[in-house]
Amino acid sequence: MAIYQGLAISGNIFIGKVRIFKPHAYQIIHKTINSSEVQSETSKLKKCIKLLETEISEFLHDKKTSQLDKDVLETHLMILTDIEIAQLLDKAISLDLMSAPQAVYTSFEEIISNFEKMDNNYMAQRADDYKDVSHRLLRLLLGNKEEDISFEPDEIVFTSEITPSLVSQFAQNGLMAYCVERGSYISHSSILTRAMGLTALVIKDNIISSLTNGDTAILDSEKNCIIINPEPVQISEYKNKQLSLLEREKFFKSLLSLPANTLNKVSISIKANIEYSGELENVTANNCEGIGLFRTEFLYLNRQTLPDEEEQTKVYSDILKGLHGLPATIRTFDLGGDKLSLLIPTQKEENPYLGSRGIRFSMQYPDIFKTQIRAILKASIHGKANIMFPMIIGVEDFRQAKAVVLECRNELLNDGIEFDHNIPLGVMIETPSAALCSDQLAKECDFFSLGTNDLVQYTLATDRNNDNVKPYYIQHHPAVLMLIQETINSARRAEIPVSVCGEMASNLMYVPLLIGMGITELSVSPLQTLPVKAIIRNCDKHLFKLIDEFDFNTHLVNIDYLLEVTLKHYYTIQS
Ligand code: PEP
Ligand code: MG
């Protein structure tokens, strides 16, 4: 028996048999070609690129292809038609005298390793899209067959790397769980994995070479570990756990059409956080009451050109249409920090999280900002759109952002273009200063959404991505809770809605605390909707009384006690 630690991508517990999978075992022969072969190698490559383009386009236009798959395929098509990549390949063949497969392998490896080395998490995690295109091109060039991808339902694939198209193929061929040696939580592959309901984990150690096909394995995504050849007693313990998880799943499904009301009849609205339009399927499947946060900056990442007004109008319109009248809060792009679009030249900053980020970045690039605002306004005729601004520190920021909206509205009016004239404008409360100025802000904006991920980071001076200071990232720190309470009070006085869209809202442990503090709207990861609803339906009048009587200003030391009490009484999922 051996236990290995990892990072859960999705799912919960899976017991099965090891299946070692080598997705792309290519034989690339590294030898210089003659200059007389340059033309034939170039045309071989061009033919394969065309073939792959056709293959991808066919899938794109297939009605059976899901929106998530389409998003990935569109990215692949963009990579394939990228002029810079074409030039790189051309140079590798004609100047460096490489064969077509060697040119593809070498050029893409260089791009992939550059992506993987980047400081910027979001870009680094896009490397797998490039791997996917490279593998598919090599398959066509070398005439390699894909590895056998028919699976037994109890098999767990162990693979050194994963790509979005492999995830799709896995799911289509009946695989239910996999472990991968290289990967990250927010890569395209991982997003697809979650959407397709697979259980998956990234293993930190290089263990595949020590495994044998047929070994028994338990993949535990709850404890972030994998157990190889467990003892019989562990297997039976895990089987029992699986049974209770199944019961829990059934219980969650039974909540689908029930309201998210507390026992004392306080109605809570649960909306969804999304990063890609493809996630709309999960939003509707989980009966979310709309989208509380659309992180639009993802539209600007990992591409060769900025998204223009037409493209953005289509994305926002499709979302609003897909919601059939439910609201969508579209957050203007929150670029800067660790999310940098390579398309916008920026200065290197010593402290990017304290630099040009969110609304500051938008104001620095007014044309790009206006393109987005115009697109949201144009799309607003298709449903209920709200516009929300990130990284606001005070009323001046909001006024400047609002002025851009007004300018865009006037332009559209002059051009006779229709839009929703009453589109609400909101502010993310994610800096301590915004929370402290919330009274003033509430008088001018239409709604608040608490971005606790950043609020915690800025209040506690603790980088949210730095594992070294993880113990200091305390979401229920009294200072954070006081700022949340201050924001709720300001919103109440001005009679504007306030929601929580940071991870605290998705964290079951904090749901009773937030509800007890007076939050009536949560925006969570769509797959977390039903567990959050289960907790809400557990909350009662005693919770409200307990938190109402709690003075965050004078009982600082008692916050842990408060959390303990709320956890004990309300953080239970009854099935
Ligand atoms: C937040 O800061 O809580 C938030 C929701 O925004 P993001 O995580 O995108 O910074
Ligand atoms: Mg934020």
Image (cartoon, rainbow, N blue to C red):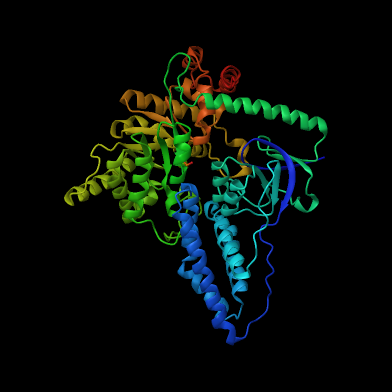
Residue 164 point in image, percent of width and height = 56, 52
Q: Is residue 500 left or right of residue 417?
A: right
Residue 259 point in image, percent of width and height = 44, 22
| Residue 302 drawn above or below residue 275 | below
Q: Quadrant of residue 176?
A: top right
| Residue 562 drawn above or below residue 443 | above
Residue 104 point in image, percent of width and height = 58, 70
Q: How many marks?
A: 0
Residue at left offset 47%, top offset 35%: 285
| Residue 99 drawn above or below residue 453 | below
Residue 451 seen in the figure: no
Residue at left offset 60%, top offset 59%: 117
Residue 413 point in image, percent of width and height = 18, 47
Quadrant assignment for the C terminus: top right
Residue 329 seen in the figure: yes
Q: Nearer the viewer, residue 400 or 45?
A: 45
Quadrant assignment for the N terminus: top right
Residue at left offset 59%, top offset 58%: 116
Q: Nearer the viewer, residue 268 or 44?
A: 44
Q: Is residue 41 left or right of residue 444?
A: right
Q: Is residue 499 left or right of residue 565?
A: left
Q: Nearer the viewer, residue 34 or 440?
A: 34
